[in-house]
Image (spheres, rainbow, N blue to C red):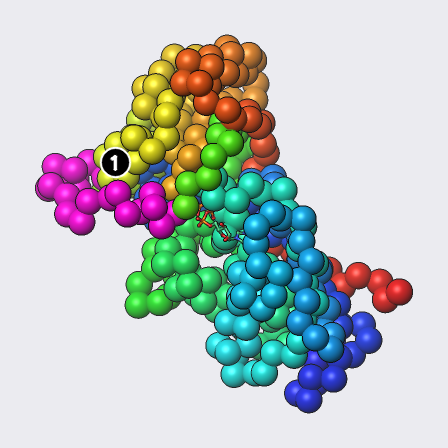
Amino acid sequence: MTATSSLVPHPSTHTIEVRAPASSANLGSGFDAVGLALSLHTTVRATLTERPEVITNLPGVPLDETNYVYRSARLLADTAGKPLPPLRLEIESDIPLARGLGSSAAALIAGLVAANTLLGEPLTTHELLDVAAREEGHPDNVGACLLGGAIIATLDDGHVEHVHVTPPAHLGVLLVIPHFELLTSKARGVLPHTYTRADTVHALSHAALLAAALTTGRLDLLHRAMQDRLHQPHRAPLVPGLTTILNEATTHGALGAALSGAGPSVLCFYDRHDDPTPLTAFLHDVLHREHLHGTLRDLTIDPNGTTHTTPPHP
Ligand SMILES: Nc1ncnc2c1ncn2[C@@H]1O[C@H](COP(=O)(O)OP(=O)(O)OP(=O)(O)O)[C@@H](O)[C@H]1O
Ligand SMILES: N[C@@H](CCO)C(=O)O
């Protein structure tokens, strides 16, 4: 069922509920190229209405049309060349903001998908991915959020090419989520503008190995493949405990460790066939030693990506 061009809502399509997952970008060496969808979610219920309205459980985000979800819906309408009718947005999220877990990508994708559905699906899924990647500047978080599982992607001239990977079911994800925010803009601001040839060769060889490890399910390669010199060493001063976790997590049972996205969360992969107790004890110990308040979460990989449903009409 499509919305009419006069935007008079059809009773069955005037509300749409979109569920978008969290994501962890980079996985070490896949800077701006690799993303993994995780089992935390932002849910947006969007309704065509008389006046713009935003309701949310998130602290500190705008409650008007400047809200990022609303701006994303407008971006979709502008890209499709259609007017956006006033929306009521009910946003609920358990993705903590500015922790390297793709909260902004989930907000962006949820707004794009909600508006695309309400306006009669003018854009294909791949076009949505292109719009989202152009908006964020990189395809890693938005690709994983939209498609689920893991994504390996490039962004050239505004267009994404990607390979979608379903990681093995026994790949476990432990996350240290510090109780402080780190804006992506700040964590990108500390990165150098140029790199040596040695660092460039290190980066491309490890990113290639990471892509191969993910696509073939070679979990034994993750630790080596996730090694990175492009961003993590430069961001380490912003994230207490990061260097210790990167250097020592595998000796406590991790398959590999990385800064999650732009941080400050830190991700450890582990094998669900193994007992994670030594790894969780180590991570708690790092938090304690660094006097860092944070939460340890054992998450699963979201295989579905962003989904939408039309709730029953009251
Ligand atoms: N559901 C939402 N509604 C409105 N604004 C949001 C929402 N989710 C995120 N944002 C905005 O995005 C900002 C966080 O974006 P930022 O890119 O810095 O971090 P992140 O996406 O959580 O982490 P990363 O990109 O490293 O994975 C928040 O401070 C807030 O302004
Ligand atoms: N690839 C991005 C993810 C955060 O948006 C970065 O590390 O800056």
Vertical comparison of 171 with 77: above or below: above
Query: Which residue shows up at 56% across the image and 41% down it?
Result: 96
**Most common SS among magenta residues:** helix
Query: Which residue shows up at 24% across the image and 44% down it?
Result: 191
Foreground: 142 or 289?
289
Vertical comparison of 179 with 98: above or below: above
Q: Residue furthest bottom?
A: 6
- Residue 232: give x, y in percent of width and height: 30, 34
- Residue 143: give x, y in percent of width and height: 47, 53
- Residue 268: give x, y in percent of width and height: 45, 26
Q: Which residue is mark 1?
A: 234
Vertical comparison of 189 with 55: above or below: above
- Quadrant housing residue 170: top right
Three-letter code, disc 1: His
In the rendered image, is residue 165 in sight? no
Q: Which residues are magenta?
A: 184-203
